[in-house]
Image (tube, rainbow, N blue to C red):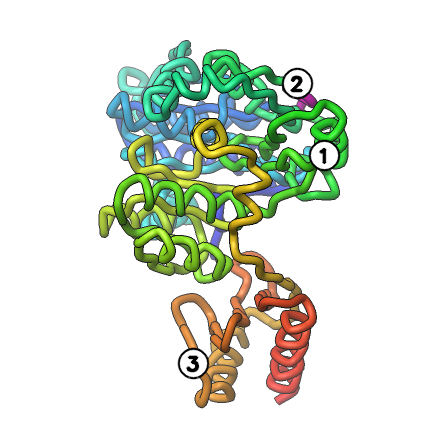
Amino acid sequence: MRLFGTNGVRGVINEDMNVQMAMGLGKAIGTFMTGRVAIGNDPRTSADMIKSAVSCGLMSAGAEVVDLGMVPTPAVQFYVKENGLSGGVMITASHNPPEFNGIKCIDSDGTEMPRFKEEEIERIYFSRDFRSCDWMRVGGLCRASGAVESYLRNIVSLVDADTIRGAGLTVVLDCANGAGSISTPLLLNDLNVRAITLNANPQGTFPGHPSEPVEAHLQDLIALVKASDADLGIAHDGDADRTIFVDDKGRYLYGDKSLAIVAEYMVRENGGGTVVTPVSSSLAVEDVVKRAGGDIIYTRVGSPIVARKMIEIGALFGGEENGGLIFPEHQYCRDGAMTVAKVLEIVAKEGPLSALVDKVPQYCQVKRKIACPDERKGTVLDELLDYYCSETVDTTDGVKIIYNGGWTLVRPSGTEPLFRIYSEAKTEGDAIRHSEECEAVLSELLKI
């Protein structure tokens, strides 16, 4: 049985995610990690309950718990890496609704826990093979301050802060009432960027809007960017490991746009380099990376997979199309605040964000899904591969059919009994047509 999804263990509070599960996972994590373990949380109303239960489990297994308080996920990751801890735990459900919470494990190098280590934690959890220390060896808990400040100092040291400070930029910042409320305003202040803030008070019910930074949830941000004549708009998800932007014309930018802009800038500034991104990323990213003289490598979907491929090959930059960008000079994980600082540097040096966006090749993406029982996913994918055997196909993650100027990708969901179908082309009509054709093929295969 699998507990961990693509980003930790998540569930509705006191239903799927309850105190007993949280304490059991804490025991399993503490048994696996040993030593000092950092823990942090976003502002969800259940944060204290779940964090306390996990901490109790960690201490019962002998771990020394370092409570960082309410902080963004990448701040916990940075603390673990910089202070040589055994690992970390973040209590967050990221972009999920407020009734959810989750437990996310961080490896000793600050990266998201790889799947094979999660499997060992799951084994310990289900077998109840916990370390249970006697009264002399149970762990303790201490509260550490300054995690956000040291994290932000490192970010500022890695960008051209003087140029940003001298640019006289104005931004509108929407923190979604999440953990970014306590970090990104401080970053902008340090960089002398005038910030008009929305939903910048941490509040676990997310009263401003749902914490997923999709266009429908950011209408207030878009309107305020237009009304205030701001240079750009910035939006975080609940735990601030991702950032989405609105340009100076008030246009919502899908994450592939910011990924492409930053990738091209970094390759050009470094005279080349390799960018790593999942197979679901837009061809626009590949286009601009090659235009700047760089190389691109595709991986399976998932930021931990991207990060570990970056480590393996010494990549210059990487990220996903959902606004999760990875800067190896800072740390090998998605980082919302680092993304903000780098985009501010690019705008300060190269001009309006809207002009940069207009230079990114335009593609259209369509996303849909089709139900499929989990036990049939492997067989159906094999049959799909046979059907498209005469086409150019990439099997890095699912089945990706590549055609002139676009592609269609079929991936089995890791958390639901369904396939996700992504299709990209130069026009929306072509993307829809290719997506519908592939869905029709899948429907026929599922009838067999």
Q: What residue type is labelled 2?
A: Ile
Q: Report whether residue 266 is seen.
A: yes
- For residue 189, above or below residue 345: above
Residue at (62%, 62%) from the top-left corner? 364
Q: Residue 196 carries which label?
A: 2
Q: In this view, does 319 lie to the left or right of 20?
A: left
User: What whole-number distance in Å separates the C-alpha atoms at marks 1 and 3?
Assistant: 40 Å
Distance in Å between CA atoms under marks 2 and 3:
48 Å
Q: Which residue is drawn at 47% across and 48% down?
A: 260
- Circles 2 and 3: CB distance less than 8 Å? no
Q: Marks 1 and 3: which is nearer the front? A: 1
Callout 1 environment at 10 Å: few (<14), some (14 to 19), or many (20+)? many
Count residues near mark 3 (Cα–Cα under 10 Å), then give few for <14, some for 14-19, many for 20+. Answer: few
Closer to the chain start, of discs 2 and 1, is: 2
Q: Which residue is drawn at 69% across and 22% down?
A: 198
Q: Give the range drawn in magenta.
A: 198-204
Q: Is residue 433 left or right of residue 118?
A: right
- Nearer the observer: mark 2 or 3; the answer is 2
- Residue drawn at the location 64% of the way across and 73% of the way down: 430
Q: Do the residues labelled 2 and 1 touch (CB within 8 Å)?
A: no
- Residue 392 is labelled as 3
Q: Sequence order check: which comes first, mark 1 or mark 3?
A: 1
Q: Is residue 319 above or below residue 177?
A: below
The one nearer the camera, 88 or 426, is 426
Q: Name the residue under label 1.
A: 222
Q: What residue type is labelled 3?
A: Thr
Residue 414: x %, y % from top left: 52, 59
From the image, which quarter does the C terminus lie in?
bottom right
Q: Looking at the image, can residue 336 be seen?
A: no
Q: Is residue 354 magenta?
A: no
